[in-house]
Image (spheres, coloured by chain):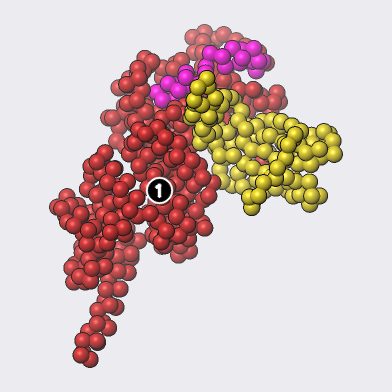
């Protein structure tokens, strides 16, 4: 089963990391990711630019409305996601657990089974 | 990273909002700062034990407020303090305070806190130092280091600035729409000053000043979170990101400044550029142009060019023209002339800058640009005179070195030409 691991955290905290802190966190996450990649189970991974750069298109009664910022103002924001092939939910939870241990920021990981997957054609 | 380091990061991230809210309660900068300090100490003690609170900012405001009230009481009569557990068991209270403190409250609080630092009586350097101390929470030694001055001098500067603000009084009324816009403009200008202070022209000080640029970007992002639909704040944030993205390419291994055209663009920070470009696009949709947006759009055109030769100079010259109309200044015209020279040739550019001669008679870059244009036109004698003048106005060794390079080139060009005429 393919799972999407959606990473939520306070971008205010993550955004105040120094370059060194950011680099070292990324390096530790990469170790977790590489292990799964080596088993051929890793799908697309993305890290998102802060929500201040986001625009939302909200469908209204007539023309859709284009709004600055994310859909809802929340304490934690979607900062990125992984897609990973796991034999069971437990395996997906273990993967998220490893990500959580590698990342010092408080936050949460939402584990969502993927229903439709098109890997796309873009190069890395 | 240890547990304590994530707590420190959370405290740093919460600081502007927490100090700003505490300032509203206590109406006194020193009390607000002390209350925040006390709340941080308790966080360092409590959070490792009890885990992080759901809303660290609300926790810090609540605990800071209680701590300061306690200390006032303690001063009044020797009353016993409530047990620590009582303060740390905040779940219900936290919920309550979160509901009352939504984004719009923080918005005016943080804006007030930043605006206090931009008091018109304070010289720019004091405004910046104060904002870095109070809003960003940098220590005095950190600020002194970035400003390249001694710690005691910086301490004095900040104390003097605080005294002046206390005397002037802090505006506590809720701002109206016009007032809010004015405050936001003043604060944006101050954030830009912080960035410029960090944007060093010299390699040997660049590393020390760099935290100021990072801090300016953090403040600008903070403003943008509070005012997510203000195109000028999008423009400001984009401008800072797009300029700072080039930081690693601005000096070569010997510490010599590398001009934009000659920079190794693979060293530019792609993440900052992506964010900056997204913000420029967002801002443009509002169709309310402003100086930061235009400058960001210019920086965006540089960022979009994979190689210097691919730069869209005619679009850049149009943007400088728009900036000139919005904020007429001889320096903007000079910058426009540089773009015009690339787009339409040196002759057109020279015609643009000639009327500036009087107003920019003491400006290094004016003579540098003028010399360059004359050199391109083959008017080498006049070019040499302009470069000689530029050298006399250079403020740093790097500036002088750069001009000397041109003079050397002129000298080299002259030699073979004389040889050639000898043969004829």
Query: Which residue sits furthest bottom?
Result: B423
Looking at this view, is B397 or A32 the one in front?
A: A32
Looking at this view, is B58 or A69 the one in front?
A: A69
- Side (left or right) of B66 relative to B368: right
Residue A110 in picture, x, y percent from top left: 71, 31
Residue B394 in picture, x, y percent from top left: 27, 59
B70 versus A108 height, above or below: above
Query: Which residue sits furthest front?
Result: A62
Q: Can residue A97 be seen in this view?
A: no
B174 versus B15 height, above or below: above
> Which residue is depicted at the point 65% across and 18% down?
B88
- Check the picture and name the quadrant holding the N terminus of chain A: top right
Residue B121 in picture, x, y percent from top left: 27, 30
- What is the span of residues highlighted in magenta in the rendered image? B88-112
User: Which chain does tag 1 point to?
Assistant: B
Task: Give the overall secondary structure of the magenta segment.
Answer: helix
Looking at this view, is A111 or B348 the one in front?
A: B348
As for residue B68 lying within the magenta part, the answer is no
> Which residue is depicted at the point 60% across and 30% down?
A77
Looking at this view, is B210 or B422 the one in front?
A: B422
> Which residue is depicted at the point 31% across and 55% down?
B339
The chain that appears red in the image is: B
Please identify which colour was used for chain A in the image: yellow
- Side (left or right) of B72 relative to A24: left
> Which residue is depicted at the point 46% across and 15% down?
B25
Q: Mark 1 points at which residue?
A: B299
B224 versus A22 height, above or below: above
As for residue B99 lying within the magenta part, the answer is yes
**Numbered disc 1: secondary structure:** helix
Mark 1 Cα-neighbour bin, 10 Å: few <14, some 14–19, many ≥20: many
């Amino acid at each position: 089963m393919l799972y999407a691991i959606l990473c939520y955290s306070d971008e205010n905290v993550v955004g105040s990391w120094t370059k060194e802190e950011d680099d070292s966190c990324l390096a530790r996450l990469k170790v977790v990711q590489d292990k799964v990649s080596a088993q051929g189970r890793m799908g697309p991974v993305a890290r998102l630019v802060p929500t201040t750069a986001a625009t939302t298109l909200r469908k209204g009664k007539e023309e859709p409305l284009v709004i600055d910022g994310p859909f809802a103002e929340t304490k934690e924001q979607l900062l990125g996601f992984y897609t990973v092939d796991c034999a069971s939910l437990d395996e997906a939870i273990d993967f998220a657990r490893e990500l959580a241990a590698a990342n010092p920021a408080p936050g949460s990981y939402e584990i969502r089974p993927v229903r439709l997957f098109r890997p796309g054609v873009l190069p890395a | 990273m240890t547990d304590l380091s994530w707590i420190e990061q959370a405290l740093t991230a919460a600081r502007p909002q927490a100090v700003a809210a505490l300032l509203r309660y206590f109406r006194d900068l020193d009390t607000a700062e002390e209350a925040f300090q006390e709340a941080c100490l308790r966080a360092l003690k409590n959070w490792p034990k009890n885990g992080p609170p759901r809303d660290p900012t609300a926790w810090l405001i609540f605990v800071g407020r209680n701590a300061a009230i306690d200390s006032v009481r303690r001063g009044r009569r020797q009353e016993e303090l409530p047990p620590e557990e009582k303060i740390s068991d905040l779940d219900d209270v936290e919920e309550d305070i979160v509901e009352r403190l939504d984004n719009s409250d923080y918005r005016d609080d943080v804006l007030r806190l930043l605006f206090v630092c931009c008091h018109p009586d304070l010289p720019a350097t004091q405004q910046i130092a104060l904002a870095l101390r109070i809003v960003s929470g940098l220590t005095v030694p950190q600020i002194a280091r970035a400003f390249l001055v001694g710690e005691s001098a910086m301490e004095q500067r900040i104390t003097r600035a605080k005294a002046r603000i206390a005397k002037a009084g802090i505006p506590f009324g809720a701002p109206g729409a016009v007032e809010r816009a004015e405050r936001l403009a003043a604060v944006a200008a101050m954030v830009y000053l912080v960035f410029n202070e960090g944007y060093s022209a010299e390699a040997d000080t660049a590393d020390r000043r760099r935290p100021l640029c990072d801090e300016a970007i953090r403040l600008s992002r903070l403003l943008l979170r509070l005012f997510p639909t203000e195109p000028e704040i999008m423009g400001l944030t984009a401008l800072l990101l797009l300029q700072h993205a080039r930081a690693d390419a601005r000096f070569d291994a010997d510490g010599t400044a590398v001009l934009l055209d000659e920079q190794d663009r693979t060293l530019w920070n792609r993440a900052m550029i992506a964010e900056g470009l997204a913000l420029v696009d967002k801002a443009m949709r509002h169709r309310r142009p402003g100086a930061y947006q235009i400058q960001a759009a210019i920086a965006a055109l540089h960022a979009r060019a994979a190689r210097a030769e691919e730069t869209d100079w005619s679009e850049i010259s149009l943007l400088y023209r728009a900036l000139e109309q919005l904020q007429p200044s001889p320096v903007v015209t000079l910058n426009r002339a540089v773009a015009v020279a690339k787009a339409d040739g040196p002759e057109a550019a020279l015609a643009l800058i000639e009327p500036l001669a009087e107003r920019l008679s003491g400006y290094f870059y004016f003579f540098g640009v003028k010399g360059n244009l004359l050199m391109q036109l083959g008017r080498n004698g006049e070019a040499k005179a302009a470069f000689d003048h530029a050298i006399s106005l250079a403020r740093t060794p790097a500036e002088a070195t750069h001009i000397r390079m041109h003079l050397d080139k002129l000298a080299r060009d002259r030699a073979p030409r004389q040889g050639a005429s000898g043969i004829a």
